[in-house]
Image: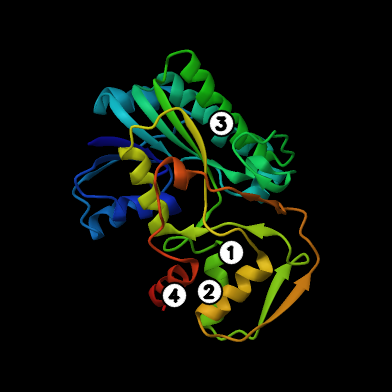
Amino acid sequence: MKILLTGASGFIGKNFLELAPKNIEIVAVYNNSRDIQDFVKEKKLNNVTLHKCDLSNEEEVKSLFKKHGNFDNCIYLAGNVNIPLSIKEPFKDLNANVFALINFLKNSNISRIIYMSSAAVYEGNKGKVTSSTPLNPHVPYSISKLLGEQCILAFHNSKKIKDYAIIRFGGAFGKYSEHKFMTQLVRQFLNNSKTIEVYGDGTNIINVMYAKDTVNALVKCLKSSKKNIIANLGQDNMTITQTVQRTANALEKKIKISYTKKRKDQKYISFSTDNSFYKIFSFKPDYSFENGIREFASELK
């Protein structure tokens, strides 16, 4: 199997390159990374061919397909994931998450796309949400991810793309995610911090899964014949307070939680997803939240 992977130098991208079955031939697209070539060489990823490409540049995208030909499958991970940036500079977020995607779809030769969207599209909802829940997000990042989904549907309806799978992803933790909340949280425990600071009152909901399971889910989707689907992917819906407490218990640590004022540059979630991906693709994670945390902590050491 030969696939195109965009966003290859990002957190999920690197995990996919490292962990995906080696019989999958991957053309890995990146843009500004300084270490991806060393990463591929160090991990001896002989099934990976790197290609530097600015997805917002029409000529570069055309050159990508001219060089590598057509693809039956594309996993699209590229885009902005920085929510504060989307609030501070919404045009940059729109360019990365929408304009670049449109340019890619317009000039691509792919049959099927697996688009990594975000559970953030449900922003503003409360309680349990499903793929049929009405959407009306307000945060720029959430809006741009929903627009990305609409772009996929538009290009499918115009017959430019034969099939799609849109995955509304809750988030992940694992290697190559140094600046993410979960990495910083685990590091605080490893450094024997006695107090963990949480923005807000701790009721904000989080839904993260171990990166290894995320890769397994993408591979499961890739190999499935299911098509034209929108699915929610995550693991346990937990409040931030529960997340900190379960992480502490997994690592056998005792801590105190300090609650501080909410930050205006962050989104606060009051919905929980149904993780419909599991049923649709007959998927089951290999790791519980606690087992993932313990393995991740041992790697960080």
- Secondary element at image label 1: helix
Q: Which mark is residue 181?
A: 1
Quarter of image, res 162: top left
Q: Which mark is residue 294?
A: 4
Q: Which mark is residue 148?
A: 3
In whole angstroms, how far apart are the C-alphas of marks 2 and 1? 9 Å
Circle 2 crowding by C-alpha within 10 Å: few under 14, some 14–19, many from 20: many
Q: Which mark is residue 186?
A: 2
> In front of the other: label 4 or label 1?
4
Which of pointers 4 and 2 lies earlier in the amino acid sequence? 2
Q: Nearer the viewer, residue 227 or 46?
A: 227
| Tally of marks | 4
Residue 31 seen in this snapshot: yes
Circle 3 crowding by C-alpha within 10 Å: few under 14, some 14–19, many from 20: many
Identity of the residue drawn at 68% across and 70% down: 241
What kind of residue is marked 4?
A: Arg
In whole angstroms, how far apart are the C-alphas of marks 1 and 3? 25 Å
In whole angstroms, how far apart are the C-alphas of marks 4 and 3? 35 Å
The image shows residue 187 at horizontal and vertical percentages of: 52, 75
What kind of residue is marked 1?
A: Phe
What kind of residue is marked 3?
A: Gly
Identity of the residue drawn at 32% across and 28% down: 64
User: Do residues under tags 4 and 1 come within 8 Å of each other at their CB atoms?
Assistant: no
Q: Nearer the viewer, residue 272 or 81?
A: 272
The image shows residue 171 at horizontal and vertical percentages of: 53, 53
Which of pointers 4 and 3 lies earlier in the amino acid sequence? 3
